[in-house]
Image: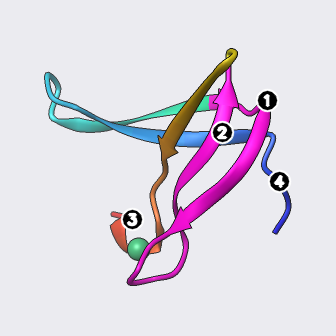
Amino acid sequence: MDKPKEIESVEWDDVEKTWKTKKILVEEYHGFTECRYCHRPLSYNIKSDGEFKVVYVKCACTRT
Ligand SMILES: [Zn+2]
């Protein structure tokens, strides 16, 4: 799989009760965790803005 340069992350907005997507630029890519059901990426381990973080994305089975 190619290393993504940009990830569309999803976050649950508790105020608006909706999923928010946000583009995150990837500085360093350190792999991903796959969904145990659909085997698509569920979260990425990356460095962005000089910080290591886990970025959640929508896997195939959470698409609405
Ligand atoms: Zn899934």
Mark 4 / mark 1, whichever is N-terminal: 4
Q: Residue 23: where, in percent of width, then height?
A: 61, 31
Q: Quadrant of the C terminus?
A: bottom left
The image shows residue 1, relative to residue 17, as above or below, that is below
* Dot in front, 3 or 4: 4
The Cα atoms of the two marked residues, 2 and 3, are separated by: 23 Å
> Residue beneath label 1, please?
27
Report, in whole angstroms, how far the alpha carbon at label 1 lies from the one at label 2.
7 Å
How much space separates mark 3 and mark 4, taking CA atoms?
22 Å
Marks 1 & 2, CB-CB < 8 Å contact: yes
The Cα–Cα distance between marks 4 and 1, rounded to whole angstroms, is 11 Å
Q: CA distance from mark 2 to mark 4?
A: 10 Å
Q: Which mark is residue 3?
A: 4
Mark 3 Cα shell of 10 Å, populated few (<14), some (14-19), many (≥20): few
Q: Which residues are magenta?
A: 24-48
Q: Work out whether mark 3 precedes mark 1 in sequence or the reverse, and give the earlier one.
A: 1
Residue 19 is situated, as x and y percent measured from the top left of the image, at 31, 40
Residue at position x 35%, y 37% from top? Answer: 11
Using residue 57 as the reference point, say whether residue 18 is left or right of it.
left
**Three-letter code, disc 2:** Ile
What secondary structure do most residues of the magenta stretch adopt? strand
Question: Helix, strand or loop at disc 1?
Answer: loop
Mark 3 vs 4, N-terminal side? 4
- Which residue matches tag 2? 46
- Residue reaching furthest right? 2
Q: Which residue is mark 3?
A: 63
Q: For numbered disc 2, what is the local secondary structure?
A: strand
The colour scheme is rainbow
Judge left or right: residue 58 versus residue 8: left
